[in-house]
Image (cartoon, helix red, strand yellow):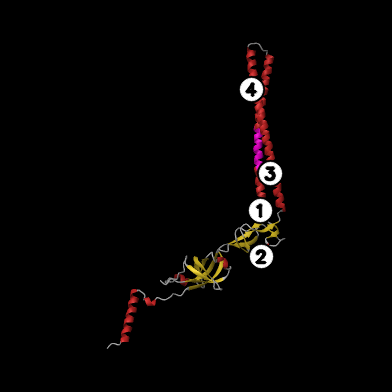
């Protein structure tokens, strides 16, 4: 008689063998997969440098910004001595006023020349009619040659005067164009001086957190010198190093671009994120690949730069 216990053992072994041969796991064998945990460091997605556009000595510093390290877009951070630049701008503006007056004067000259042309044309017409009448009388023998020559002389003078008036008008128009060109150059100079004046005021390019911002009144700086760095607090990422074995494993690990993760802080707070970049080069000694995780904007401002966090990625049980 077959022992009942031995029969159960035989049946269980047969079931396991069938499962192994068919590749179908037993329902009882499905167990929770341990999550993958990685150590990471918080960093800013992009850090922008702020430099002085022009050299000069500092006359004012935004103390609230320096103490808090927070700035709004367009907020004044540092002001340099602008007395010389302001004087140049006022000189350029006064020059523009003078050039505008010159253009106005040229227009008056054009108007006067136009009036002169009209008078000379009318005079030429009258003299021309007189010449035509006298010529008919002269041909009939009723006018002597001396009188005819006098009429011809008046006609020539009237023609010359009309031509001269036209030339004066053309010269006045040309002078006005030159004055207008000079005025445009003067306006450009004003704009240039304004740009130079604005460059003496250092402003925040966007809302963000400042790094290394510690200017002092009285210090003199040179053009191009670094004033600070700024980054957007809601744009942060976590840098992690993934072992090559986890990336090339035959089993599904879930470590791939777009994979969601949970970022845990030392105080227990968590934040969501996802893989946005996985490097293509492994460290020769430790075989780790540098990767980046984008942090959710809602909780990114709470994380400190260079803060150590733990990244957890649940592997896909399938």
Q: Is residue 277 left or right of residue 200?
A: left
Sequence-first tag of 1 and 2: 2
Element under disc 2: helix
Whether residue 277 can be seen here: no
Name the residue carrying label 2: 67
Q: Residue furthest top?
A: 141
Q: CA distance from mark 4 to mark 1?
A: 62 Å
Secondary structure predominantly adopted by residues drawn in magenta: helix
- Could you say which is closer to the camera, residue 262 or residue 308? 262
Report the magenta residues as a range.
170-183
Measuring from the top left, give residue 262's x and y in whole percent: 50, 70
Measuring from the top left, give residue 173's x and y in whole percent: 65, 34
For mark 3, does the 10 Å Cα neighbourhood hold few (<14), some (14 to 19), or many (20 or more) residues?
A: many
Name the residue carrying label 3: 96
Specify the quadrant of the image occupied by residue 164. Answer: top right
Name the residue carrying label 1: 198
């Amino acid at each position: 008689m077959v022992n009942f216990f031995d029969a159960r053992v035989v049946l269980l072994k047969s079931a396991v063998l069938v499962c192994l041969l068919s590749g179908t796991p037993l329902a009882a064998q499905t167990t929770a997969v341990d999550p993958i945990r990685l150590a990471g460091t918080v960093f800013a997605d992009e850090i922008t440098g702020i430099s002085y556009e022009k050299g000069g000595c500092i006359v004012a510093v935004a103390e609230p910004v320096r103490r808090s390290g927070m700035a709004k877009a367009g907020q004044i951070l540092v002001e340099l001595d602008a007395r010389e630049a302001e004087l140049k701008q006022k000189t350029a503006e006064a020059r523009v006023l003078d050039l505008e007056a010159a253009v106005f004067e040229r227009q008056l000259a054009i108007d006067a020349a136009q009036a002169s042309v009209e008078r000379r044309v009318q005079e030429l017409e009258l003299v021309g009619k007189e010449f035509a009448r006298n010529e008919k009388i002269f041909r009939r023998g009723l006018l002597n040659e001396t009188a005819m020559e006098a009429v011809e002389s008046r006609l020539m003078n009237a023609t010359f005067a009309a031509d001269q008036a036209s030339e004066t008008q053309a010269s006045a128009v040309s002078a006005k164009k030159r004055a207008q060109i000079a005025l445009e150059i003067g306006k450009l100079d004003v704009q240039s001086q304004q740009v130079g004046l604005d460059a003496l005021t250092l402003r925040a390019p966007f809302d963000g957190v400042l790094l290394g911002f510690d200017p002092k009144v009285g210090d003199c700086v040179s053009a191009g010198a670094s004033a600070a760095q700024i980054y957007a607090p809601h744009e942060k990422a976590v840098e992690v190093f993934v072992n090559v074995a986890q990336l090339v494993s035959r089993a599904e690990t879930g470590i791939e671009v777009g994979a969601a993760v949970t970022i845990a802080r030392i105080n227990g707070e968590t934040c969501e994120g996802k893989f946005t970049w996985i490097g293509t080069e492994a460290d020769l000694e430790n075989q780790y690949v540098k990767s980046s995780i984008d942090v959710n904007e809602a909780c990114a401002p709470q994380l400190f730069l260079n803060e150590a966090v733990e990244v957890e990625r649940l592997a896909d049980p399938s």
